[in-house]
Image: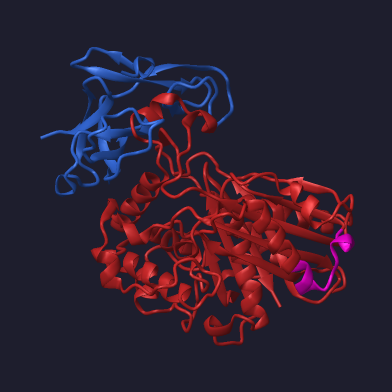
Chain colours: A blue, B red
């Protein structure tokens, strides 16, 4: 699990980003300078757990290892950007891999894929 | 126009797979061909620049071409490597530091998708471990959203690919020379929704060299611009992107290239655009200013971007039919434009008269190089 990126609890994880004190720009993962105004006065920010699906795709072939550390037995998985309102659009795995069940704008919530990484799941 | 910079020599090593031939050997082959085309000897070249992503150091070609003491700068800028070499030579000629220059781009990649490591791109290891370090995902998500916003159909994506293979079949230097119909493209397997197997280019091999000179007749390089990304543009290998949208490096480089040339997008007779996959060609058409967002649907469906159309795009088959030897692609685009503007493109020659050409390459981590060429 990528603990350096995560706070909160296993049932309610949060992503740890950064916020520029000079211009308010939010970044993920945390970085020590602002990509917008170049200020180095940045602080940690716990990102919203819910957002809207901004775009998506399905990964249908197994990425090469390294760097990929997923199971040898490959199952396609969803990938998307989730827009956290007023903060940032975060790229993440999706728990859903059926293209029929994904649409731009749908509401998503942060969750964890056990022993793997963070992901967003569609809200009912 | 005695101080205009012209491209006076073209050389290419066929693209594809060439077992037993190194990238550097392909580079030397292309360089010799370009010199012969220009009617110049290697010892008459004042300056050289070149690069590859993974096939060695360009300047070592001097041991094959001859040890003349020429200043030779190696460049490495992902898919914009060739463009960067060209811009370097252009600047040297403009500055008066050289009268003649040679640029060369080449590469040789193993089969299969590129396998970049996050640490080399300033991203944490977690990004690759969790299965996000793939350029194909970026292109898929960019066109997925673009299609929803601007009404681009799957049929249009397939038509871009079938056009590329139709053109590749006419190009003796292309890798993929078998035409594929729109239906065959749509029947190929889904790789990263909405992009299918035959909508993607493959890493390959090849080399291109150009000879540039000041004050000699040729196809003129009116401008050459290279840009990295600005805040707010959606780029490959981005764990996050801002909620405010910004201008893309392609849009910025294209606008600057047209401005420097004093030539507008409406004047372009033929274009070569980065088509890593079908969607990239669609979106780059609008980012470069060659059409409006959404206009691609009618443009491509009507055949306007085919060889006989109003604005032929990737008349040599683009990356889709030629494959992607990273260091060579940008110069292949310029090679094709010069050949077309000279009227020497053989079976794939566009019906004239053509005066103005445009090229655009795009690559990780959000770089773009554009040129405007004219007779």
Task: Residue B225: tell me if it is visible.
Answer: no
**Which percent across, then down, holds residue A108?**
21, 33
Q: Please identify the residue farthest to the front as the structure is shown.
A: B20
Q: As drawn, is B319 to the left or to the right of B159?
A: right
Which residue: 42% across, 76% down?
Answer: B166
The answer to which quarter of the image holds residue A73 is: top left
Which residue: 53% across, 84% down?
Answer: B347
**Which percent across, then down, holds residue A79?**
29, 39
Of helix, strand and loop, which mostly describes the magenta segment?
Answer: helix
Please identify the quadrant where the C terminus of chain B is shown.
Answer: bottom right
Q: Nearer the viewer, residue A75 or A53?
A: A75
Q: As drawn, is A67 to the left or to the right of A113?
A: right
Please identify the quadrant where the N terminus of chain B is shown.
Answer: bottom right
Q: Nearer the viewer, residue B38 or B226?
A: B38
Residue A103 highlighted magenta (yes or no): no
Task: Residue A17: tell me if it is visible.
Answer: yes
Q: Please identify the residue farthest to the left as the structure is shown.
A: A124
The answer to which quarter of the image holds residue A115 is: top left
Q: As drawn, is B342 to the left or to the right of A79?
A: right
**Which percent across, then down, holds residue B15?**
55, 63
Image vertical order of residue A110 relative to residue B241, above or below: above
Which residue: 64% across, 66% down?
Answer: B12
Identify the magenta region. B34-45
**Which percent across, then down, holds residue B123?**
48, 28
């Amino acid at each position: 699990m990528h603990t350096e990126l995560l706070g909160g609890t296993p049932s309610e994880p949060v992503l740890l980003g950064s916020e520029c004190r000079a211009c308010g720009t939010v970044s993920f993962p945390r970085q020590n300078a602002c990509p917008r105004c170049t200020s180095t006065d940045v602080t940690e920010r716990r990102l919203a757990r819910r957002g809207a699906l901004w775009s998506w795709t399905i990964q249908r072939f197994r990425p090469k290892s390294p760097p990929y550390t997923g199971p040898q037995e490959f199952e396609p998985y969803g990938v998307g950007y989730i827009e956290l309102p007023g903060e940032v659009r975060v790229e993440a795995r999706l728990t859903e891999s059926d293209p029929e069940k994904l649409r731009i704008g749908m509401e998503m919530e942060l969750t964890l894929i056990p022993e793997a990484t963070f992901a967003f799941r569609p809200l009912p | 126009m005695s101080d205009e910079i012209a491209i006076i020599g073209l050389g290419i090593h066929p693209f594809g797979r060439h077992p037993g031939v190194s990238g550097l050997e392909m580079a030397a082959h292309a360089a010799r061909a370009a010199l012969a085309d220009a009617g110049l000897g290697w010892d008459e070249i004042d300056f050289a620049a070149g690069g590859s992503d993974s096939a060695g150091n360009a300047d070592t070609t001097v041991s094959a071409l001859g040890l003349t003491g020429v200043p030779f700068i190696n460049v490495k800028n992902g898919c914009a490597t060739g463009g960067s070499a060209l811009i370097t030579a252009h600047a040297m000629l403009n500055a008066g530091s050289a009268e003649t220059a040679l640029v060369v781009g080449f590469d040789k990649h193993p089969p299969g998708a590129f396998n970049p490591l996050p640490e080399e791109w300033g991203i944490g290891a977690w990004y690759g471990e969790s299965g996000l370090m793939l350029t194909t995902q970026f292109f898929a998500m960019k066109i997925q959203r673009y299609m929803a916003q601007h009404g681009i159909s799957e049929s249009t994506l397939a038509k871009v690919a079938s056009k590329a293979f139709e053109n590749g079949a006419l190009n003796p230097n292309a890798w993929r020379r078998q035409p594929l119909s729109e239906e065959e493209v749509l029947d190929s397997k889904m790789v990263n929704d909405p992009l299918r197997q035959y909508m993607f280019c493959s890493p390959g091999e090849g080399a291109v060299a150009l000879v540039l000179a000041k004050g000699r007749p040729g196809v003129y390089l009116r401008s050459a611009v290279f840009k990295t990304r600005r805040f707010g543009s959606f780029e490959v290998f981005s764990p996050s992107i801002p909620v405010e949208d910004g201008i893309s490096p392609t849009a910025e480089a294209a606008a600057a290239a047209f401005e420097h040339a004093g030539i507008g997008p409406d004047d372009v007779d033929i274009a070569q655009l980065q088509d890593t996959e079908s969607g990239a060609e669609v979106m780059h058409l609008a980012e470069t200013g060659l059409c409006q967002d959404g206009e691609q649907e009618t443009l491509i469906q009507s055949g306007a971007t085919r060889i006989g159309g109003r604005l032929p795009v990737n008349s040599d088959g683009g990356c889709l039919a030629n494959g992607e030897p990273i260091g060579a692609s940008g110069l292949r685009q310029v090679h094709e434009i010069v050949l077309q503007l000279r009227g020497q493109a053989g079976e794939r020659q566009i019906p004239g008269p053509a005066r103005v050409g445009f090229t655009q390459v795009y690559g990780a981590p959000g770089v773009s190089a554009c040129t405007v060429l004219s007779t």
